Image: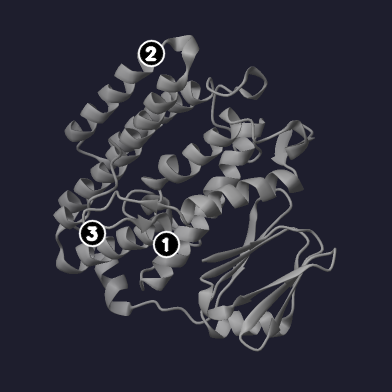
Amino acid sequence: MNLYVCDQGAHISLKENRLIVKKADHSQRELPISMIDMVELFGGVQMTTQASTRCLKEHIPVVFYSYKGYCAGKLTGPGFIDPKKVWNQYRFLDRQEDRLEIDKKIVKAKINNQLIILRRYTRKRAETGGEYGSWNEKMKIMIRRIERATKIEELMGIEGIAAKTYFETLGSFPDEKYRFSRRSRRPPKDPVNAALGMGYTILMNEVLGKISGAGLLPEVGVFHASGYHRPALACDLMEEWRPIIVDSTVMSMFTGHEFTDDDFQKVGEAVYLSHTGVCKLIRKLQMKMDSSCQYLDVSKQKIVFAQAVAHQIYTYGKMLELEAPELYKPIMLR
């Protein structure tokens, strides 16, 4: 499990084999180190040297976020990077046909999952009578165009057109005061984009931690451009999960009236989550990651989302090792 701490003034210390989280009101909770996969700290949270050192020793990443939800950095110990797996990653970049096949799978899964999310919310809206708009055919056309693409640049164009249609439609589902017409980031211009941005950042760090744990190099991707300090592989492998984990969680909070105006703060032209908003979103995302799903074919039993994300990353590594693109099957909502 991940330990999220967003209570301002909280203090984290170490006691034997447990992390102690003490809040400003002097209430506290204790968690065994053995149960923690990652520690994520938001804003003014303090952590002792002893607690940080123990996390480093146990290979538990500690992620620091600003008050506005930006990831300020990460504290990690010696990595598990496997030279052979990294060699497989670089070697795969030269296999253009196989690389394009994986890229098509990534983009198709993302657009398919976005389409299903739109359909689900449309069916819930009485004002539309549950009927799909022109966006439905536009998204389906983009999915069909994927198979005909011959270059990564074409796929990027398809993804961009689908994203524009997706967010234009998604923005019409919340109550009128929270509606938006496009995706905005750095800075977000409205409450929904503020929540989406923080959600994607949290998901990114979840995927990054699991990529490192699998011995892969996060900077070597196949769809997003690789580069120094750019976690291209994390950007690739989180695509299929964006609509499933973040978008669905955020939209359920807005359509379910879980957010209030006090959960947001306006700074110039930008809108950010307030402290209460951050805490609400973190709780919901944690519940999502710990909830069960049955999207994978590997087991008849349900597993939690966090395990499903880890499994997909493991499968990607196995695909590289065996040079078998058919092994990697992104999650496709139905």
Residue 11: name its quadrant: bottom right
Question: Mark 1 is on which residue type?
Answer: Glu
Binning the other alpha carbons within 10 Å of mark 1 as few (below 14), some (14 to 19) or many (20 upward) gives some
Frontmost of labels 2 and 3 is 3
List the residue tagged with mark 3: 299
Asked whether the viewer can see residue 157, the reply is: no
In what element is the residue under mark 3? Answer: loop
Going from the N terminus, do you reach mark 2 or mark 3 first? 2
Question: Rounded to the nearest whole Å, what is the CA distance between mark 2 and mark 3?
Answer: 36 Å
Between discs 1 and 2, the one toward the N terminus: 2
Residue that numbered label 2 is attached to: 133
At 50% from the left and 53% from the top, the residue drawn is: 203
Q: Is residue 301 left or right of residue 73?
A: left
Foreground of the two, 282 or 124? 124
Q: Residues within 10 Å of mark 2 (few under 14, many from 20)?
A: few
| Image-based side of 155 in relation to 94, left or right | right
What amino acid is labelled 3 in the image?
Ser
Q: Are marks 2 and 3 in contact (CB under 8 Å)?
A: no
Question: Foreground residue, 45 or 143?
Answer: 45
- Disc 1 target residue: 219
Number of numbered tags placed on the structure image: 3
35 relative position to 302: left or right: right
Image quadrant assignment for residue 277: top right
Closer to viewer: mark 1 or mark 2? 2
Where residue 175 appears, as percent x and y from the top left, is 62, 21
The answer to whether 141 appears left or right of 17 in the picture is left
Q: Amino acid at mark 2?
A: Gly
Q: Which numbered disc flags the more N-terminal residue, 1 or 3? A: 1
Residue 90: x and y in percent read 28, 65
